[in-house]
Amino acid sequence: MEVILAIGVIAGLSVVAYRVIRHIRKERYFASEEFLAHKQAIARYVWEHNEIARYVAEIRSRGTFAIGSSSSGAQAHLASFDNTSYHNYRRDRNVASYGSPNVHNCSLQVVRNASADPIKYVMKYFNIRAEEGVLLHAQVLGESISRLESALHNLRVREEGVARAMNPPGFILKHYLSEFMHHVGVELSPISVPYPTFTFEYVSAGGNSSQRTSLTLDTPVIDALVETLSQKIRYRKSAAGQRSLMTARLREYIKARDGYACRYCRVSVQQEPHLLLEVDHIVPVSRGGLSIVENLQTLCWRCNRSKSNKIVSA
């Protein structure tokens, strides 16, 4: 017994000693001339990263990230509910999410049908009507999500570039990555893409059975929603209408057409491999601009940030 206890004490002391030594090595590394020299060399790159991080916060605060809602349970807050069964341990295994606008409480058949035809059922039960105003709202949602996705991806690429440029010891990246970024001066963004998610939920009367179907509106799903809306309102019969859908495919087409370069400052991805490019409405949507090829241009994040809702073209 004493031998086992001694082994445990020795093992514990070894772990503590390892962590102390690792901490000392970490402090020495961050104070080293090599680290400080590398930090100074990439200061400009870090500054631009942090500007994009702030730009990400602007996109998140100004963008549109919601569409549609369910009315099932919209007045649930007006009533109180108590399970008076003597078998609570059985009845409360599954609890319905009443009152949530993104959850539709429904029958088991609706849950299964929604799984087979999600766009149709989301439109039907979450009040997304086939109207041009709703189509425009869906396009704006897709654009907001696309911009945020691109900006966050750009941040991750830049952070990987910082790590490659500094080339810290492996134990720093493994155990002290956040602290490393802090010492370098990189502002890590806590923001993620707030994809709207719609859920069809069935909970049996006794609470012993439940099923759900969920649909997350990422870029491919939003493109499918826009396509369905446009077909239902026959918006695509005209030539202009066929070019009006602000989909991921259209955004990529505009960037390729413009040579993956900003049409305002002329900087391209060939000159700046990590350049963040966005597709912008020349005449802003808020001023009646349409999502047609002639009204779209490629701008870098700097020019688009300064443009806001002004009319600026090459």
Image (spheres, rainbow, N blue to C red):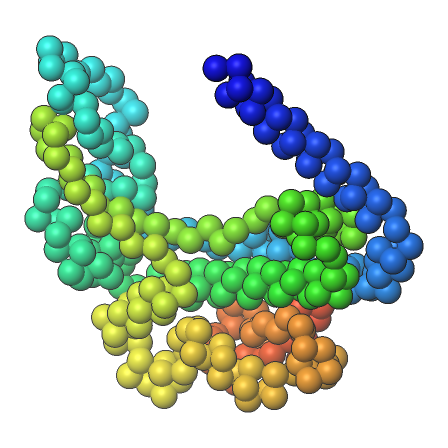
- Is residue 276 placed above or below 81 in the rendered structure? below
Taking the spot 15% from the left edge, 48% from the top edge, the residue there is 111
Q: Is residue 194 left or right of residue 275?
A: left
Q: Position of residue 261 (x, y in %)?
A: 65, 83
> Which residue extends farthest right?
33
- Is residue 122 placed above or below 251 in the rendered structure? above
104 vs 239, nearest the viewer: 104
Taking the spot 57% from the left edge, 49% from the top edge, the residue there is 191
206 vs 143, nearest the viewer: 206
Q: Position of residue 126 (x, y in %)?
A: 26, 50
Q: Is residue 296 left or right of residue 113?
A: right
Q: Quadrant of the C terminus?
A: bottom right
- Is residue 302 placed above or below 179 in the rendered structure? below
Q: Is residue 81 left or right of residue 269?
A: left
Taking the spot 25% from the left edge, 74% from the top edge, the residue there is 231
- Is residue 45 placed above or below 201 in the rendered structure? below
